[in-house]
Image (cartoon, rainbow, N blue to C red):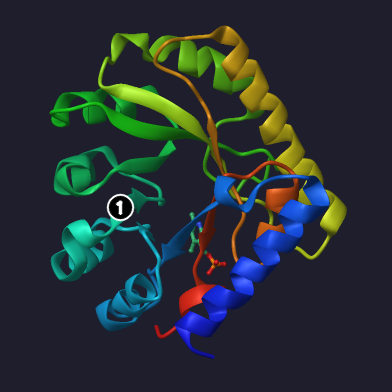
Amino acid sequence: MSVENNLKQIQANINEACRISNREPSEIKIIAVTKYVSIETAKKAIKAGIKNIGENRDSGLLDKWQGIGDQAIWHFIGTLQSRKVKNIIDHVDYIHSLDRLSLAKEINTRVNRKIKCFVQVNASKEPSKHGLQEEEVLPFIEQLGQYPNIIIEGLMTMAPLTDNEELLRNTFKKVKELQKKVQATALPYAPCTELSMGMSNDYKIAIEEGATMIRIGTALVGKEF
Ligand SMILES: *Cc1c(COP(=O)(O)O)cnc(C)c1O
């Protein structure tokens, strides 16, 4: 399947998930995750109409950025080591993996503008997953006022790798509930309007539960390495 055809299929699925959940397809942004593919394939995604690109490593992000640059909006979606912040900070529009104050501090120091970040939540409580526990999220966000360049644009989660629809749905529901609590704090630096959740195998359920940004790799651009 070509990237173009994959995208058509994904858009049809987005439309269907929106119909089921009474949402508008225009509320959903697709982030093409290009970590498993070449710059050439990433460019095909841009050509097919993709605007947002996600990478989970600093080297991968910089490689793709060299070839694509300002033709895309750039998302850093992987675990971010504080010492790598300086490498990527001038090349990203969104950071999806904010999960500790030391990282917030480093981002705030290195960035020369305001930057949109997502707080990563480990809603499924899997020990192998990064992110804050649900109950840690509000206290964490309340402490971010000391870092004026950080905007909390939303929450991000990775669901368990499973076909158990109920488990997936419950994971996404928890993050949606948490978003409402963050919004209720009315902190000026935490509008928290976005939910970054849903990957190739679970994005339809994520949309039904409120996702606004879905991060799709394999189902859109395939896997070359
Ligand atoms: C790789 C990755 C994705 C995309 O995964 P697919 O299953 O290939 O769609 C999404 N989010 C994060 C954080 C990733 O690392």
Q: Position of residue 23 (x, y in %)?
A: 71, 45
39 and 50: which is toward the camera: 50
Q: Quadrant of the C terminus?
A: bottom left
24 and 81: which is toward the camera: 24
Q: In this view, does 217 lie above or below 177?
A: below
Q: Left or right: 134 with respect to 20?
A: left
Q: What residue type is labelled 1?
A: Trp
Q: Callout 1 environment at 10 Å: few (<14), some (14 to 19), or many (20+)?
A: many
Residue at which label 1 appears = 74
Query: What residue is rendered at 62% in x and 30% in y?
Result: 133
The mark total stands at 1
Q: Where is residue 218 in the image (x, y as percent from the top left)?
A: 53, 75
Location of residue 138 (image quadrant): top right
Location of residue 125 (image quadrant): top right
Disc 1 on helix, strand or loop?
Answer: strand
Query: What residue is rendered at 55% in x and 79% in y?
Result: 6
Q: Can residue 143 be seen in this view?
A: yes
Query: What residue is rendered at 53% in x and 38% in y?
Result: 131
35 and 25: which is toward the camera: 25
Q: Residue furthest right?
A: 166
Q: Left or right: 69 with respect to 199?
A: left
Q: In which quarter of the image is the N terminus?
A: bottom right
Q: Position of residue 147 (x, y in %)?
A: 28, 15
Q: Position of residue 217 (x, y in %)?
A: 49, 69
